[in-house]
């Protein structure tokens, strides 16, 4: 058994990020987002998380090949099941492996629907509360490591990891990190002993507006119905 702690996400050449998949055939959604005029690729939490896990597992398998085989090779586009069979053999069942991956992905997605997390700025990064996101992430980091290394509580670790990945993804979609010209990740994000300083100027990026809240809640409702 092995556990890969994923704190770096890959999104590819993605022009937009949405928390969940949208039903673009809904006229209310179409009128808000104009999907027929959108260009490029849109990704959601599920796709980003599953792809990040797939790429990191492939990298892990290549770094530690079975039997120390120097010629061990894995195609870049290999699926999770293909990666498992290539590493453990065709007779090994990937069922538990796939369920473990799904549990991480599910924990990420549920952070947007859970009554405990959906309005928590420390989880969602709403209202420019990025310092709260960092504080929560740095608190959860040792919890994940303890669950894996000391308690062997793997289901709990996967749940914590999924929620952590959700907050990391929300940081990049809710902050101005990309708009500031950064082309790489914020390496201090989620790591204990680091604070998030100087991420934006003095001007407020977000303002409270009842009309915007109505649009947001309507969009959120349609998004959840489309899941």
Image: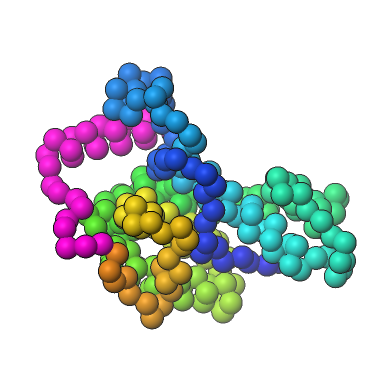
Give the main secondary structure, helix, strand or loop, of the magenta stretch: helix
Instruction: Name the residue located 74 percent from the left edge and 62 percent from the top edge.
Output: 61
Choose top left, top right, bottom left or bottom right for residue 2: bottom right
Choose top left, top right, bottom left or bottom right for residue 227: top left
Residue 100 place in picture, x, y as percent:
61, 55
Residue 157 place in picture, x, y as percent:
52, 65
Residue 198 located left or right of residue 75: left
* In this view, 96 is above or below 198: above
Residue 132 located left or right of residue 79: left
Instruction: Name the residue located 43 percent from the left edge and 65 percent from the top edge.
Output: 186
Indicate yes or no whether the magenta region holds residue 197.
Answer: no
Indicate yes or no whether the magenta region holds residue 202.
Answer: yes
> What count of labels does the image hold?
0
Q: Is residue 27 visible?
A: yes
Instruction: Name the residue located 46 percent from the left edge and 46 percent from the top edge.
Output: 45
Residue 96 place in picture, x, y as percent:
68, 53
Q: Which residues are magenta?
A: 200-227
Q: How is the image coloured?
A: rainbow
Q: Which is more toward the observer, 65 or 149?
A: 65
Q: Is residue 81 visible?
A: no
């Amino acid at each position: 058994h092995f556990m890969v702690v994923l704190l770096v996400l890959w999104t590819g050449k993605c022009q937009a990020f949405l928390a969940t998949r949208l039903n673009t055939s809904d006229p209310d959604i179409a009128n808000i987002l104009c999907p027929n005029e959108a260009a490029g690729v849109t990704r959601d939490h599920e796709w980003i998380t599953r792809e990040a896990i797939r790429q990191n597992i492939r990298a892990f398998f290549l770094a530690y090949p079975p039997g120390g085989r120097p010629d061990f090779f894995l195609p870049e586009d290999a699926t999770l099941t293909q990666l498992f069979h290539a590493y453990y053999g065709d007779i090994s069942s990937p069922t538990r492996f796939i369920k473990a991956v799904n549990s991480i992905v599910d924990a990420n997605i549920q952070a947007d629907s859970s009554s405990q997390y959906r309005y928590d700025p420390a989880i969602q990064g709403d209202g420019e509360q990025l310092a709260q996101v960092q504080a929560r992430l740095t608190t959860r980091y040792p919890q994940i490591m303890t669950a894996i290394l000391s308690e062997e509580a793997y289901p709990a670790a996967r749940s914590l990891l999924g929620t952590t990945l959700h907050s990391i993804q929300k940081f990049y979609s809710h902050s101005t990190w990309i708009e500031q010209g950064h082309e790489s990740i914020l390496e201090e994000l989620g790591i204990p002993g680091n604070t998030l300083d100087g991420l934006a100027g003095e001007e407020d990026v977000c303002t409270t507006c009842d009309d915007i809240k109505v649009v947001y809640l309507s969009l959120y409702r349609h998004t959840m119905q489309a899941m």
